[in-house]
Image (tube, rainbow, N blue to C red):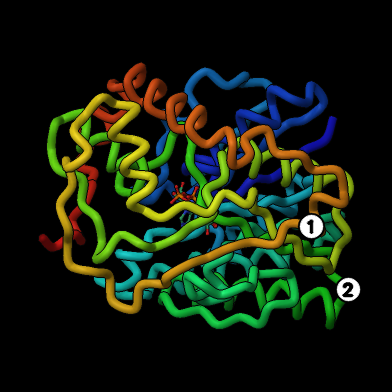
Amino acid sequence: MRTILVGGGAGFIGSNFVRYMLGAHEDVKIVNVDKLTYAGNLDNLADLPEDRHLFIKADISDQVRMEEVIGNIRPDAIVNFAAETHVDRSIHEGLRDFVFANVMGPQVLAEATKKFEIPLYIQISTDEVFGALELDEDRLFHEETPFAPNMPYAACKAGGDLICRSYFKTFGTPIIVTHCSNNYGPYQFPEKFIPQAIEKALADQAIPIYGDGLYVRDWIHVIDHCRAIDLLLEKGVPGEVYNIGVDNERSNLEVVKMLLELLGKPADLTVTVKDRPGHDRRYAIDARKITALGWVPLYGRADFERGLREKIEWYAKNTDWVERLKSRGAEFNSHIKI
Ligand SMILES: NC(=O)c1ccc[n+]([C@@H]2O[C@H](COP(=O)([O-])OP(=O)(O)OC[C@H]3O[C@@H](n4cnc5c(N)ncnc54)[C@H](O)[C@@H]3O)[C@@H](O)[C@H]2O)c1
């Protein structure tokens, strides 16, 4: 059996990864460490096989606790998704939690990887560390693109990434850092753009659009992100950085139009809201390096509509999941000012 310690496995991508790995590999056991912040949801992990999935509530920035857990378990690999992830919260609620989770957390995991000689640690990061591209710019983010984070969330992620890099360069600690584009798919906390838009449209409420709506992101299905990490566990080279994206650049307006059409709602069921300060215009990924390892996404640009339709169907089938989140007082759009 291979034991993989997953950080943040009760969140959106982490829980999809745990589910995917347990389904794809019979020889994998997951130890899932999550602090269960507002974004962590044990409902995401219901019905997983108990003999191969162990949940531990812990904070990845707590060095004593994490060294106790990692020292006892001695996993074959660590994959860390745990982070504070909501850009708007990083702007409006202060950065303290972001620094602990996104900077201190990777430092604690890098130190434990070194101390207990864990064979591989994959730190999951974001394309937002590279800053923003212009709409008409003939340039993509590649692995060597210098960091230029604009959002406080992205700055904290960049800090964690650089600490990981320094552990490899200084101590040879086997760490890989990945930069993925925007994910969509099941189990996404409804404060994020696509689930929120679905939620609003289903309730016949106007979908909030920041500013002119021409903010472009490269949308990747979460399952393709999970498959990319699975591949890196097998073929990734420690010390290397891998960008993950599917060349599916879409503006927010375009995504909302597609959703409204799929839901059979009027195309003008939208409302313009006050723009996010310093809003990054465009992110776009050059994913040739991971593609060269043999990664072939299941949902390319041509499959985006199918991916959105499946996501809508998932939300329609899982209204209990949304309702339970709401009953726990989850805030869905507290930062949007109309
Ligand atoms: N969502 C995206 O589109 C996207 C894109 C690229 C990269 N990423 C990265 O992927 C990772 C996962 O993102 P997500 O959207 O699933 O996030 P999420 O907010 O849905 O989940 C984050 C999880 O981390 C947990 N957590 C937070 N702080 C913690 C701490 N200190 N200790 C332990 N657990 C903690 C939360 O409880 C939650 O379960 C993040 O590192 C994020 O930066 C996300």
- Quadrant containing the C terminus in the rendered view: bottom left
User: Crowdedness of circle 1 by 10 Å Cα count: few (<14), some, many (20+)?
Assistant: some
Judged from the image, the secondary structure of the residue bearing numbered disc 2 is loop
Name the residue rendered at 89%, 48% in the picture.
235
Q: Amino acid at mark 1?
A: Arg
Q: Position of residue 205 (x, y in %)?
A: 13, 38
Name the residue rendered at 40%, 37% in the picture.
41
The residue pinned by badge 2 equals: 172
Residue 10 visible from this viewpoint: yes
Q: Which mark is residue 201?
A: none
36 left or right, relative to 272: right
Residue 93 visible from this viewpoint: no
Name the residue rendered at 47%, 70% in the picture.
135
Q: Position of residue 37 (x, y in %)?
A: 38, 51
Q: Position of residue 253 (x, y in %)?
A: 33, 51
The residue pinned by badge 1 equals: 288
User: Crowdedness of circle 2 by 10 Å Cα count: few (<14), some, many (20+)?
Assistant: few
Taking depth in this image into account, of 107 and 304 the one nearest to the observer is: 304
Answer above or below: position of 24 versus 284.
Answer: above
Q: Amino acid at mark 2?
A: Gly
Point out the tag, 1 or 2, that comes first from the N-terminus.
2
